[in-house]
Image: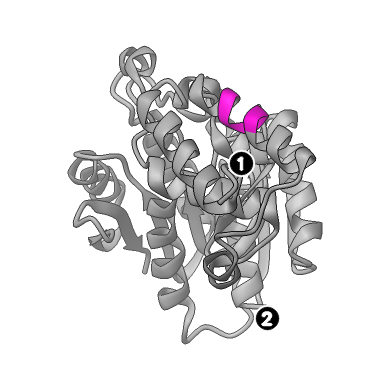
Amino acid sequence: MPNNTVFSAYNKTKEKLAAAGVEDFGFEARVIMRHITGFDNKTILMNYNAVLTDSQQAKLNEITERRAKRYPLQYILGEWEFFGLRFTVGEGVLIPRADTETAVETALKFLENKESPTILDLCAGSGAIGISIAVKRPDSRVTLLEKYSEAAKYLKENIKLNRAENAAFLEGDVLKGDGSDGKYDLIVSNPPYIKAGDVAALQPEVRFEPENALSGGEDGLDFYRAIAKKYMRALTPGGGICFEAGIDEAAAVRDILLAEGFYDVHTVKDLAGIERVVFGTVK
């Protein structure tokens, strides 16, 4: 059997990534092989003995080498899946993560009984949250607010990529309250929430992501305070606010919402059992 089959290439890739300290090396090796071959999950299992072309092998070597240096796979591939949709990503924008799907699920559940809802996605980044909501609720109107032009470039590309005609980009600074003059049934946000002093100790991959999308100030809570205070009046009666929170931050975020006068404040756990989302409403 040739030593450059899909099967052998997958095993070698997995070994190289594991040796480099990549945590989920098996999953990433499968993603890389799908990208190289163009096969989906089912087809790749049926073509394990297929021989890679010279160009496929060269591309595989290049990707594996870059990933072994702990450069994010998402940036290497230029796109990533989130909530069943494709999003373009690259340096300058936060990478969409599966944990954040809990925020989308929570938001969609809240919106179930609201007709033609209006949504504001703050610190929108790639647009993963807002665009996912817009696609799943085509009757909604979603405004995605983002300050940084590097991230906004991807956000606008992703609106087009996912044909989210009911989603619109708005340039603005959350800390200044930009966009708070509108009226929304739901405000959703995955703001920067890493403590400033902890950013340098993050995984090597994360340090390639923009610090402005990671650091939430000294205690990691600056954006939660600002959003709760500046955007509460932008909610319609009975409207909701939906935050993603970092590990061990949910209680502090809940207290911030309660102190500002939000009602029915509760948390939602992600698939790992971590309190990942904090939700509150206004009267």
> Does residue 62 belong to the magenta stretch?
yes
Instruction: Between residue 7 and residue 179, name the one nearer to us.
Output: 7
Q: Element under label 1?
A: loop
> Residue 21 at x, y = what percent?
35, 26
Element at badge 2?
Answer: loop
Query: Can the viewer see residue 206?
Result: yes
Residue 11, compared with residue 216, is above or below; it is below
Give me the C-alpha separation between circle 1 and circle 2.
23 Å
Q: Nearer the viewer, mark 1 or mark 2?
A: 1
Q: Look at mark 2 in the image and give the residue it sits on.
A: 139
Quickly name the residue at label 1: 125
**Colour mapping used in the image:** one colour
Task: Looking at this view, name the residue that lies furthest to the front.
Answer: 1
Classed neighbour count for the residue bearing mark 2: other residues with Cα under 10 Å, few (<14), some (14–19), many (≥20): some
Q: State the residue in front, 72 or 36.
A: 36
Label 2 is placed on what type of residue?
A: Asp
Q: Quadrant of residue 221?
A: top left
Q: Main secondary structure of the magenta part?
A: helix
Report the magenta residues as a range. Answer: 61-65
Give the residue at x 58% y 46%: 32
Q: Residue 73: horizontal and vertical position, in percent?
A: 56, 36
Sequence-wise first label, 1 or 2: 1
